[in-house]
């Protein structure tokens, strides 16, 4: 088959462009793809309300908006069969490029107020509120991770009081937005990991992130000296990003701080049972709350307060989780083919 020529409009947020990359990976399972990535950086002097008004105006001229608001030269755009993007800052240029080239488009995320679904051929959502919309496809947030390439088992076991994980992953984030962790909560989390190891013989693969405080990472490094507790410690300060697949490939279950939606979502995509842990002081915005509810409603994850952590509460949470059995990339590919048959 000839390659599917895709213009991929990417903002600067990994949590957004990784979702779009997941969609493109799913598309590549149906047809070869040829991707042109264009960085989207809006001139902040241009207000959103003006952009929205121009998009809906009869005099709307895509090349002008692309040049004035996003520094994108319309004449330099390649020929394409599809436009894909994720994140609010990519919505307007997605519409501009789509109308200019006259091709289908996919957007991943929530629409800005005042933008109608009809501006997009397909909108990838992970919120049940969109399930009745003809333009929306409600699925787990797409990830380019392939559980089969990771070596995940075809039949995913369930864990609980009678079946305990031998290897567990602990993904540690940090303060973000409305998430605030106290020193006592960090000590409680690491004490819980040691307690599980002592009670069950479980060993931990622990990874930090760019948000993890240095004193917490240092404390984990100390804990890692006890090989009966920590099988491996991946320190973000030296390892950098991109290390999660190593943990997903080896772990039986994942514990992840609730400040990171992307880490939780990717672990679910890897067909792992995921238990999120939250500090006392935290609050989700509306979209994040809806997404966590979506994950729990499907039985893919559970949440515990850090103050509630114990081997018993962890075992109970694991017993309530039924990991995804199918390959999420194959499942998404099938749905994309059904919704956009003209591309295949």
Image (cartoon, grey):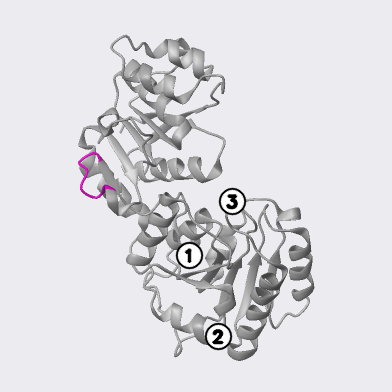
Disc 3 or disc 1, which is closer to the eye?
3
Circle 1 sits in a helix, a strand or a loop, which is it? loop
Circle 3 sits in a helix, a strand or a loop, which is it? loop
Q: Position of residue 139 (x, y in %)?
A: 32, 52
| Residue 325 in view here | no
**Residue 188 colored in magenta in the image:** no
Q: Position of residue 308 (x, y in %)?
A: 55, 79
Q: Position of residue 13 (x, y in %)?
A: 55, 40
Mark sitting on residue 311: 2
What distance separates the C-alpha of mark 3 from that of mark 1?
Answer: 35 Å
| Residue 190 in view here | yes
Image quadrant in which the C terminus is located: top left
- Going from N to C along the chain, the mark reached first, 1 or 2, is 1
What distance separates the C-alpha of mark 1 from that of mark 2?
Answer: 27 Å
Q: Position of residue 49 (x, y in %)?
A: 43, 24
Residue pictured at 45% horizontal, 35% vertical: 88
Question: Which residues are the magenta region?
Answer: 130-135
């Amino acid at each position: 088959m000839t390659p599917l020529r895709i213009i991929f409009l990417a903002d600067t947020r990994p949590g957004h462009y990784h979702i779009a990359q997941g969609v493109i990976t799913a598309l590549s399972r149906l047809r070869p793809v040829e991707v042109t990535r264009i960085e989207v950086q809006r001139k902040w002097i241009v207000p959103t309300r003006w952009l929205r008004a121009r998009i809906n105006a009869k005099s709307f001229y895509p090349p002008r908006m692309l040049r004035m608001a996003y520094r994108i030269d319309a004449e330099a755009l390649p020929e394409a069969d599809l436009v894909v993007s994720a994140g609010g800052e990519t919505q307007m240029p997605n519409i501009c490029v789509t109308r200019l080239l006259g091709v289908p488009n996919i957007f991943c995320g929530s629409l800005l107020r005042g933008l109608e679904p009809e501006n997009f051929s397909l909108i990838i959502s992970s919120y049940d509120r969109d399930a009745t919309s003809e333009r929306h496809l409600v699925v787990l947030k797409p990830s380019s991770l392939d559980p089969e390439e990771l070596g995940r088992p075809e039949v995913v076991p369930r864990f609980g009081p009678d079946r305990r994980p031998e290897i567990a992953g602990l993904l540690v984030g940090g303060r973000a937005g409305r998430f605030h962790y106290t020193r006592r909560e960090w000590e409680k989390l690491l004490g819980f990991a040691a307690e599980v190891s002592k009670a069950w013989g479980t060993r931990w693969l622990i990874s930090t992130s760019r948000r993890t405080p240095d004193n917490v990472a240092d404390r984990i490094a100390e804990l890692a000296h006890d090989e009966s507790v920590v099988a491996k410690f991946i320190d973000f300060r030296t390892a950098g990003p991109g290390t999660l697949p190593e943990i997903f490939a080896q772990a039986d279950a994942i514990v992840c701080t609730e400040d990171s939606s992307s880490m939780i979502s990717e672990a679910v995509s890897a067909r792992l049972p995921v238990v999120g842990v939250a500090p006392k002081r935290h609050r989700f915005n509306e979209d994040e709350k809806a997404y966590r509810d979506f994950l729990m409603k499907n039985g893919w994850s559970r949440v515990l307060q850090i103050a509630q952590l114990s081997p018993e509460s962890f075992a109970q949470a694991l017993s309530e989780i039924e990991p995804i059995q199918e390959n999420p990339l194959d499942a998404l590919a099938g749905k994309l083919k059904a919704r956009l048959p003209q591309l295949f």
